[in-house]
Amino acid sequence: MSLYSEKLATLKREFKQIQDSQRKPLKLNQKIIYDFVNGVTKNAEFDLNGLSVILKKGDAKKGFMHILLKHYSTNCVGCITAKDILNMSIMIERGIKLNQEGVSNQSLVVYRHMKNGVNHNIVLKKEIDDKLVVTMYSLD
């Protein structure tokens, strides 16, 4: 079993535990990400503040696979958690859009969201069809 498959299976278990422990149903964008992670949909696509954001599987350098392989962990301080992934759209909505500082590639849109002393950066890259492709990492 590959590292990606192992981490995906762990994330699916955590998502199930989160859903089972909540009294309320998942919000629309949470459900979209939940379905994507569980293989119901090929991509997670949602609208935020007039932006069309899409989470694709990607590869080891960008997208969901990158998030899982490089930044997701169940027992790491400062790592991205299952709840962070599930709440990605909320982090974009509540995050601060970075301008020049902290953005190495000016063609990217970066939102920073602080949670429990950890900075989560969500990176959006515009595609040809005006959809913004997302990846995410944390800075502790």
Image: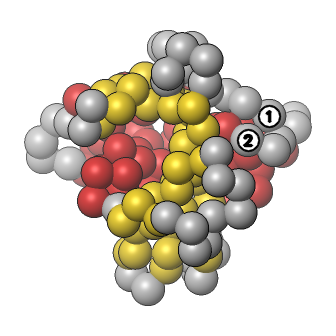
In the rendered image, residue 2, in percent from the top left (x then y), is placed at: 87, 37
Residue type of the residue flagged with mark 1:
Asp
Q: Position of residue 50 (x, y in %)?
A: 27, 31
Residue at 41%, 39% in the rendered image: 16
- Asked if 43 appears above or below 69 in the picture, the reply is above
Q: Residue at x 44, y 86 (%)?
A: 117
Residue for badge 1: 59
- Marks 2 and 1 close (CB-CB < 8 Å): yes
**Mark 2 lies on residue:** 62
In the structure shown, which secondary structural element does the residue marked by tag 1 occupy? loop
- Residue extending furthest toward the right: 2
Q: Amino acid at mark 2?
A: Lys
On the image, which quarter does residue 57 sit in? top right
**x 67%, y 38%: residue:** 63
Residue 136, how many percent across, how many down?
Answer: 59, 53
Query: Is disc 2 surrounded by few (<14), some (14 to 19) or many (20+) residues within 10 Å?
Result: some
Residue 56 seen in this snapshot: yes
Secondary structure state at the residue bearing disc 2: loop
- Mark 1 crowdedness (10 Å alpha carbons): few <14, some 14-19, many ≥20: few
Please indicate whether residue 118 sits to the left or right of residue 116 in the image.
Answer: right
Name the foreground residue: 66 vs 24: 66
The image quadrant of residue 51 is top left
Instruction: Looking at this view, name the residue that lies furthest to the left.
Output: 24
Q: Mark yes or no: residue 11 visible.
A: no
As measured in the structure, the alpha-carbon distance from the residue carrying label 2 to the one carrying label 1 is 6 Å
